[in-house]
Structure formats: C-alpha cells, structure tokens
Amino acid sequence: MDFSELSHQTEIRDSLDKILSEHCSQELLKKYDSDFKHDESLLSLLSSNGFLGLGLKEKYGGSGEDLYDLGILFERLGYHAAPLSLSGCLADVAQTIQKFSKEESCNEILSSIIAGEIYTSAILEPANQDPESPITTAEIENNHIVITGTKYLSEIASIANRILISASSNDGILLILVDKDQVKLTELNSTANSPLFKVELDSVRVSVESVIHEKGRGLEALKYLIQLNMVMRSYIALGVTEKMTSLIAKYTSEREQFGRVIGTFQAVSHRAADCFIELECLRLVNQQASINLNINLDCENEALVSKIWAGNACHKISYSAQHLHGGMGVDKDYVLWRYCLLAKECELINGSASQNLNRLGKNITANQ
C-alpha cells in the first residue's frame, strides 16, 4: 500500500515548517517558559496564510474538509513546540460545529475562527472518568438554559470569545456555547506551562439558541468531539516525538566516547531504532484514525488506538531520549527538556495509555 502524502499535503507541511521555524526558535520560546503561552502574532500569521481553515469546507472559507490536513497542522505545532494551544478551537469547536450545527451558525462561527478569533471547549471534569456522561447540569426553562458545574483543562479559556460546554439535561446531553464573561476562570499549573483553566459555571443562564446541535444529537456530537480531540492531540504527540527522535539521531551521531561515535554502539543504535519504530507506528494509526473520521462520525476504537500509541510513544521516546543524551537532556540551554515536558502532557491528557487500553478492550469484547 502507498502511504505517501498527496502533493498539497507536502506543501502544507513545508509551508508550516518554514513559518514555524522562524517564529519558534529556542531563544523566542524561552520567554514562554514562564509567561502566558500564546503568540498572537504567530496566530495572525497562520490565519493570513489560510492554515486556520484546514479541515473546513471551502464554502466557509476553509481549504477543504480533510482531517488529515488538519492533523498536519497540529503535528507541526508539536514538532516546533509552538506557543499556541488550538485543539479546543480548531478541532473541538470548529469541526463539531461544521458537522452538527445549522448553516447560519457554521457561516458565522467558522468564518470568525478562520479569521483568528479564539473559541475553546470545556469538556473534562474533575473526578469524572467518563466525559460522555457530564456531571455538569443544564436545566431548560422556557427559552433559556441554566448551567451549573465545573470543568477543567480548558485551553486558553481566558482569551477565548466563547467556550463550548457539555452538560446533562432532561433532553439528554447538550453542547452549549457560553460567553467567557459568564464563567469563573482559574488558571491551572501544568507540566509544560500550557494555558489550561478550570471553568466554573454557577447557574449560568443562556438562550436555547446557544445549543450547537439539533435536538437529540447531543451525545453523538459529544462522542465525535472527544474522539477528534484524542486524534488531534495524538498528532501533536507525533510532532513532539518526531522532534525528540531527530534529536536522538543528531546527538548520537556526533557524541564520541571511547574514541567512537556512540551511535555505532549496538545498544545505542537499537534503542534509537526502537524510537523510530514507535514514531512510525504512531504516524500510521493517526493517519488511519483521521481518515476514518472523515467518513464516519463514530470511530471510537480507532481514536483510542491513536491515543494509546501516543501515550506509549511519548513515554518511551522521552525516556530513551533522556537516557541517550545523558546529562544534556536536563540542561535548559539545550532543547530536549522542553519536548519531554510536552510529551508528558500529551501522554496524560484524555487519560493514560492503560486507561484507554482498558476502554478499548471493553469495546472489543462487547462486540464479540
């Protein structure tokens, strides 16, 4: 089988690498190790070059409805450790609205996202291992909905225009857009200094028009959002692990010990080869999941496999990279430490590999 990319996908990758390499040098990234991790100028540049429209239909101003193209964007953001957290906006909100919202909502919201306006999602909840069954409640009162609950790990919520909330109601699961000013936000400490927030909703009152989907399709939309988020975060993990693997290759081909380049030692070369195998397996399962999600709104098993490989690859490649670099791996004047922190974050958000493997096993046995 031919797994090579189409010509336009190679062009997307090359163009992104050119832009991101100029704006994500190690010197420029240092300021985001302690500051709020969001580069507005880089976001504007991606918008003006059409990259925020990847995966969106041309009639909304996008470049075409292909999730593999969108995956390339997240992969390159991960590879360059770009100070942008966009999975909540470009995947969760934009793609879910494109699939489940009315035409007028799609036109309004998607065109603004392509222009660089920030939206985000708040789906995960403290002490709730099943995001498909939200603890957050939504009470329907005539033409309004009253929402109460707590969400966490919401990306860049402090600068988002609106936040997509999942909630349980008497009419089933609802996905509701809420103005940022209606909620209480608390910034969370994160492994890689990513801008993640706790979102508290205390009897927040919104119009029923804020529900983004048709009646009865809330659970279907939520499942799609969760699966897509797992896959796009796995693309970020792919970029992060690809960078760490390239650092391994470069360092072990230059570092000498006992009068020889350490990459010629069998134990070192085998360890590096294992990292490459993990990386390419992750690339393949991501490709499979994104292509399947293009044609099927429910690909839970493919998304879980993608997330499982991402978690395992992040852990194994990060560990191997530190081991093969020796003390250089924790030197903050060197690049590796930043990617190891990103890898740990990618590994654990949306559940660990073992948690998702358990869910995959239950799905498989239930279908036997």
Image (spheres, rainbow, N blue to C red):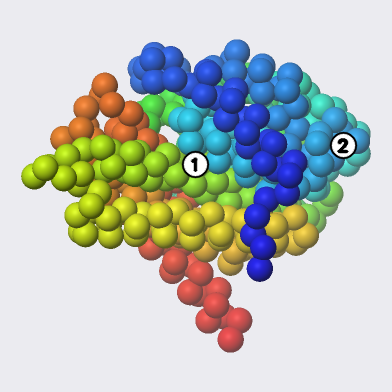
Q: For residue 86, say whether it is visible.
A: yes
In this rendering, would 357 be left or right of 139?
left
Mark pair 1, 2: CA separation? 27 Å
Question: Residue 58: which disc?
Answer: 2
Q: Position of residue 327 (x, y in %)?
A: 16, 35
**171 lies above or below 190:** below
Expressed as whole percent of the image width and height from the top left, the position of residue 346 reads 43, 44
Binning the other alpha carbons within 10 Å of mark 1 as few (below 14), some (14 to 19) or many (20 upward) gives many
Q: Which residue is mark 1?
A: 239
Dot 1 or dot 2: first in sequence order is 2
Q: Residue furthest front?
A: 259
Asked if marks 1 and 2 touch (Cβ < 8 Å), the reply is no
Q: Locate residue 61 relative to residue 52 in the image: left or right.
A: right
Which image quadrant for residue 303? Answer: bottom right
Q: Residue at x 55, y 25 (%)?
A: 20
Quadrant where the image shows the C terminus: bottom right
Closest to the observer: 127 or 121?
121
Identified at 28% across, 60% down, the residue is: 270
Up the image or down, 233 lies above or below 329; here it is: below
Amino acid type, mark 1: Gly
Q: Is residue 212 left or right of residue 344?
A: right
What is the total number of numbered labels drawn onto the structure image? Answer: 2
Amino acid on which disc 2 is placed: Glu
Residue at image point 45% right, 44% down: 242
